[in-house]
Amino acid sequence: LTAQYSQAKLGQLWQVATPLLNAAVYFFIFGLLLGARRGIPHDVYVPFLVTGVFVFTFTQSSVLAGVRAISGNLGLVRALHFPRASLPISFALQQLQQLLFSMIVLVVVMLAFGSLPALSWLLVVPALLLQFVFNTGLALLFARLGSKTPDLAQLMPFVLRTWMYASGVMFSIPAMLEGRDVPGWLADVLQWNPAAVYMDLVRFAMIDDYGSSYLPPHVWAFAVGW
């Protein structure tokens, strides 16, 4: 993790600067130009967006690292006998460490927009632990697939970008679906997809005005199931 940013003058600060810059771009395009703030109070949208970007980036980075875990370390794999699963697991742990740095910034954002520490913030711990287990499973799965099909590493950024746009990173899924003629099964798929579930749980835990009305039913059961 240290070597990853060794050539940059800001060094480890890029761990949090990159998702923050992404959040700023999404705020300009989706929040200001496209009006994706619908259904979300104006003073809540920035914490809502930053939380979504940080939490989704955790899953996105774990998958991208996992898909290259074996194919990108063939020299090590061929030279030594060791459990191959340790590679994708180590990459998932690396992304968890990056997320913990990002959570420090997220706390500052919450305080700046009036969300004060409360007991509900403790719910972040089980939510992120469940997400870490889910991410590790994805990393293991895609490490195996990526070792057989190296071109998968080129395809996954497009798949993950589509997943991000469908997961409510920049908008509230219930607010966007309200008043639209959308099949019930499609609304369920959008709200119960794992990325949306983990983002919703962290938002619910940390943002005062993001209440249970924004959550799909049985959300913790789905988080454990995923």
Image (spheres, helix red, strand yellow):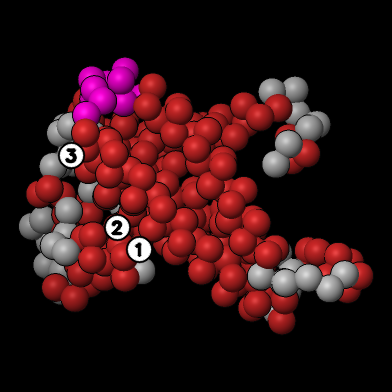
Residue 197 — which label? Answer: 2
Q: Determine whether the residue tagged by mark 1 lies in a helix, strand or loop.
A: helix
Residue 181 — which label? Answer: none
Mark 1, residue position: 194
> In the image, what residue occupies the spot 78% across and 39% down?
3
132 up-or-down from 145: above or below: above
Pointers 1 and 2 in contact (CB under 8 A)? yes
| Residue 129 percent location from the top left of the image | 41, 53
27 up-or-down from 90: above or below: above
Q: Amino acid at mark 3?
A: Tyr
Magenta range = 109-118
Q: Determine whether the residue tagged by mark 3 lies in a helix, strand or loop.
A: loop
Q: In terms of depth relative to the viewer, which is nearer, 216 or 78?
A: 78
Q: CA distance from mark 1 to mark 2?
A: 5 Å
> In the image, what residue occupies the spot 61% across and 61% down?
89
In this orientation, does residue 216 appear?
yes
Label 2 crowd (10 A; few <14 / some 14-19 / many >=20): many
Query: In which quadrant of the rendered view does residue 191 lie?
Result: bottom left
Q: Amino acid at mark 2?
A: Val
